[in-house]
Amino acid sequence: MGFFQQFIDFLNRGGPAMYALLLLSIVSVGIVLERLYFFSKQHSDPNQLLREIGDRVSKDDMNGAIAVCDRHKGMLPKILQFGLYRHEKSRADISDALSISLLEQLNSLEANLSIIGTVAVIAPFVGLFGTVLGIIRAFNDIALKGNSTPAVVAAGVAEALVTTAAGLAVAVIAVVFFNYFKSRIKAYNQEMIVAANKLAEMLAFHNAGAPIPTELYTPRKAPFSGGGAPAPRPSGPAGK
């Protein structure tokens, strides 16, 4: 109860602007936690996903490739599955379908991020508004009491300094997380684009009846049989 009372006293000392900053900080923290949880649910290894899909595509097991996407979590498996359902189409049609799915999922990546950006922009202004209110209060106290002793202006100056510091603190934290999520979105978007293009190439080679190049996915190595490598055949005439 003591800490809670101290916190309320701190808010009251800063004036009405402090309650606005408290609301902004609560909104920011809620969105940050939601975004952290969202990114934790995304697929973390696109190469592994492509390997499993490529193994089944190379064996002409499209249903198995689609089932691989069902077993994995996140947006990338959904995007690749969207292309796998159209595996019999042309290379251009598959690429168009993957591009549409990518654009749809991009909105999910950036959901609520603009709110954090807005908080980062307006929090210093809210703090400045509290500073102005504190200065107004200080001058009103001077006018009412007819003197300008430190005791008279201390409350107003304290209110101004508290709201300024709080506004900057909220803004700095919001900017840090905004840039962090922006960088994660950029990196994840690039991963999805590369994976989608590799899948389109896989399906194009498969539809053409050609073997899938190993650079598009890393095939699983066959287990070592222990039989050893065959002996080289002699290059010269037999018996020599």
Image: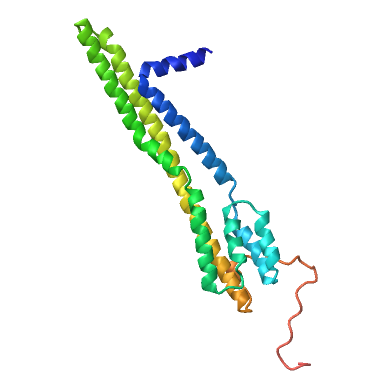
Give how far across and how far down residue 175 sits, in percent.
Answer: 40, 39
- Quadrant where the C terminus sits is bottom right
* Residue 90 higher or lower than 129, as above or below: below
Q: Which residue is drawn at 29% across and 19% down?
A: 134
Give how far across and how far down residue 207 sits, in percent.
Answer: 61, 76
Q: Residue at x 59, y 62 (%)?
A: 82
Give how far across and how far down residue 162 sits, in percent.
Answer: 35, 21
Give how far across and how far down residue 122 sits, in percent.
Answer: 35, 34
Q: Nearer the viewer, residue 225 or 166?
A: 166
Q: Is residue 80 left or right of residue 55?
A: left
- Quadrant where the N terminus sits is top right
* Residue 71 higher or lower than 180, as above or below: below
Q: Which of 232 and 67 is in front in this view?
A: 67
* Residue 210 higher or lower than 196, as above or below: below
Q: In this view, does 3 lie to the left or right of 45?
A: left
Q: Nearer the viewer, residue 17 or 153?
A: 17
Q: Is residue 148 visible?
A: no
Q: Residue at x 55, y 46 (%)?
A: 39
Q: Residue at x 22, y 10 (%)?
A: 142
Q: Is residue 164 visible?
A: yes
